[in-house]
Amino acid sequence: MWMRSELKEHAKRVLKLNYWWVIAALVIFMFVREGAGSVSFFSVSVSNEDMLDSYLKGSMMLRAFFVTAASMATLLNIAVSTALWCLVVNPLMVGIQRFLVKSCRGRVILGEIMSGFSRSYKNIVKIMFFRNLFTFLWYMLFVIPGIIKAYEYRMIPFILAENPDIKMEDAFALSKRMMDNEKLNAFVLDISFIGWMILGALSCGIFHIFYVNPYYQLTNAELYLVLKQKISR
C-alpha cells in the first residue's frame, strides 16, 4: 500500500535535485500544448457594419456566404488543432512522462522529451488518439463514467513511455490492471493538490509553472513507478 505523503516527499526530492531540467521540460510542453490549442490558420473577418449593410440591402446570398465562410474557417481550425494535438502534443506528452520517470530514477536527460517522435511514433499516435477518443465518448455518455475511465486510462502515457511498441489492447489492459482498486486513491491524491492549485492561480500562474505543476507531475511519475512495482510482484 502506497502513501500519498511518501510519493510527494519523493517528488519533492527529485524536483530539488533536478529543478531547472524539470522546469525546462514542462515549459516546453506547455508552450507546445497551448500553441496547438489556440492555433488559428484560417480566419474570416467580417465587420458588423458589413453584415448589417448586406442584410439591409437584401443581399441574402452574400450574407449566407459570410456565414458559411466563417463556419468553414472554424471547422478547419478545429481540424488543424486536432491534428496538431494528435501528431505533436500527444507524442511529446509521452516523451515528457519518459523524462519524468527517468528523473525519478536518478537519470536526467532532457532529450528524452523527444523520444515519442523517434520510437514507434505511429503506434504512440494511434494509442494516444484512441485513449483520448474513448475518454471523450465516455464523458459524452455520462460525466461520472467518464471520470472513472479517465483514471483507468491514466497510466497509458507512462506505459508508452517505457514500452512504445506495446499493442493497443495490451496498453489499455495494463493501465486498467495498474489502476484496479487505485482509482479512488489516485483521485484523493489529485484532490490533495487543490490548495497548491489555488496558490498557483492566485500568483497568475507563475507559482504553478515554477513549482506546483512540476511537483504534481513528478508525484504522478512516482505513482506510476509504485503501481508498476505492485503488479510485478
Image (spheres, rainbow, N blue to C red):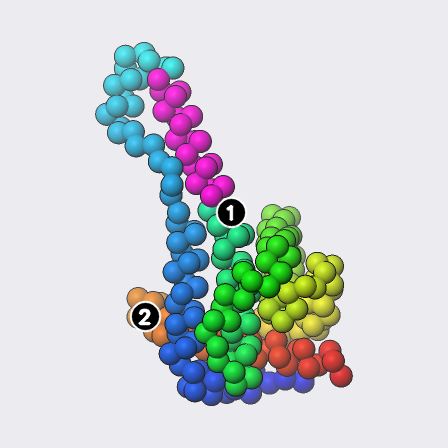
Disc 2 target residue: 206
Q: Which residue is rendered at x = 42% and y = 86% of the image?
A: 16
Position of residue 52 measured from the top left corner of the image (x, y, whole percent): 27, 21
| Residue ranking furthest to the left | 49
**Visible residue check, residue 211:** no
Q: Amino acid at mark 2?
A: Ile
Name the amino acid, label 1. Answer: Ala
Q: Give the x, y percent position of residue 36.
A: 43, 52
Report the residue marked by disc 1.
83
The Cα atoms of the two marked residues, 2 and 1, are separated by 29 Å
Image position of 18 with respect to 127: above or below: below
Left or right: 99, with 149 as reference point:
left
> Which residue appears at 31% of the width and 17% of the height?
55
Residue 179 seen anywhere in this rendered image of the structure: yes
Residue range of the region highlighted in magenta in the rendering = 62-80
* Magenta-drawn stretch, dominant element (helix, strand or loop): helix
Tell me: residue 53, above or below residue 122.
Answer: above
121, 88: nearer the viewer: 121
For the residue labelled by badge 2, is the local secondary structure a helix, a strand or a loop? helix
Question: Which class describes the residues within 10 Å of circle 1: few (<14), some (14-19), or many (20+)?
Answer: few
Residue 71 located within the stretch drawn in magenta? yes
Q: Is residue 72 magenta?
A: yes
Q: As drawn, which residue projects farthest toward the top?
A: 58
* Residue projecting furthest to the front: 118
* Image quadrant containing the N terminus: bottom right
Instruction: State the SS at label 1.
Output: helix
Please, is residue 184 above or below residue 130 in the view?
Answer: below
Q: Quadrant of residue 43?
A: top left
The answer to whether the residues at label 2 and label 1 have Cβ atoms under 8 Å apart is no
Badge 2 or badge 1: first in the primary sequence: 1
